[in-house]
Image (spheres, rainbow, N blue to C red):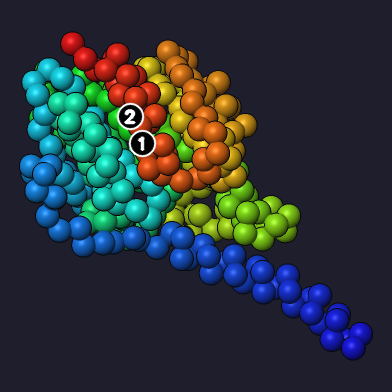
Amino acid sequence: MGRMTGALLVLAPLLAIGAVLAAGEILSAAAPAAIGDAPADLHATTVRIAVRDGFVAGWLVRGRPRQGAVLLMHGVRSNRLQMLPRARFLAAQGYTVLLIDLPSHGESSGSRITFGAREQEGAGAALAFLAQQCPDERIGVIGVSLGAAALVLAQPQPAPAAVVLESMYPTIGEAVANRLQMRLGAAGRWLAPILVLQLPLRAGVSAAQLRPVDDAAALRCPVLVISGAADVQTTAAETRRIHAALPGPKQLWLLDGAAHVDLHAFAPAEYEKRVGAFLAQYLGR
């Protein structure tokens, strides 16, 4: 019995480490999906935007002239379909809307998810495309989780006229530690470095490249930072750090009771009221 207990004490950590190594492979694998045609009510055009090693796929919805244009970017392992409710809300307000699949997601090219390092190329290319398509419009961005990080890491110049950052992680180390702790308890924080150390092997990037909180100071435009007050994947304290790092003008909105969920779906009426007012203030003519 004693030998069995000792063997289990040795085996359990090895199994946990093996599981974390396997998770690194799974989490960085591409997330392709066949999206198909845009919903008829959007009257959208399918677009392909060139990036260095391929293309970004998306839909472009034309709005009213001089009303403004908004780029929508989804979260990790999702695609542009996640942003459809936001697109409908914005299109009803008259905005031109561009929904994209980030690199290695949906119908966009790419073989590995890099948690913002290469996704930022898609963000930058989409912004440039939208500016070319809408030269007379002020451009805004709504980025969710990975989409938010991709925008901040891109450090776009010129900066958009307005940005909404939803549930964005401050550093990849904290993001991994929070998620592992949520699933494995306190042991998750001890295992987090093993997952982070796989980044160069799995995704070809380092943890030092994935610190949006450090790049936030370069985002010199009005920013609305949103997160769930009950989010344990990106905590309220981390969200406040991101907000504090921004140069401003800036606003912070922590949704009571919301975890790491789709914040538009969690509180659609309040979301559309607050985000709509923010975009109207900076994109409207």
- Coordinates of residue 172 in the picture (x, y in percent): 54, 44
The residue under label 2 is 272
- The residue positioned 34% from the left and 60% from the top of the image is 31
Q: Is residue 97 left or right of residue 256?
A: left
Q: What amino acid is labelled 2 in the image?
A: Glu
Q: Name which residue lies at 15% across and 44% down.
A: 59
Q: Is residue 159 visible?
A: no
Disc 2 secondary structure class: helix
Name which residue lies at 20% across and 19% down.
138
Residue that extends furthest to the front in the rendered view of this protein: 269
Q: Secondary structure at mark 1?
A: helix
Residue 31 visible, this angle: yes
- Of the 4 image quadrants, the one containing the N terminus is bottom right
**Where does the image place residue 210, in percent across and percent down from the top left?**
49, 41
Q: Position of residue 137 (x, y in %)?
A: 15, 20
- Circle 1 Cα neighbour tier, 10 Å, few/some/many (<14 / 14–19 / ≥20): some
> x%, y% of residue 163?
35, 25
Query: Could you say which quadrant of the image residue 66 lies in?
Result: top left
Determine whether 116 is above or below 135 in the image.
Answer: below
Closer to us: 195 or 188: 188
Residues at marks 2 and 1 touching, judged by CB atoms closer than 8 Å: yes
Q: Residue at x 85, y 81 (%)?
A: 5
Q: CA distance from mark 2 to mark 1?
A: 6 Å
Residue 144 is tagged as none
**Mark 1 highlights which residue?**
268
193 up-or-down from 161: above or below: below
Q: Nearer the viewer, residue 183 or 84?
A: 84
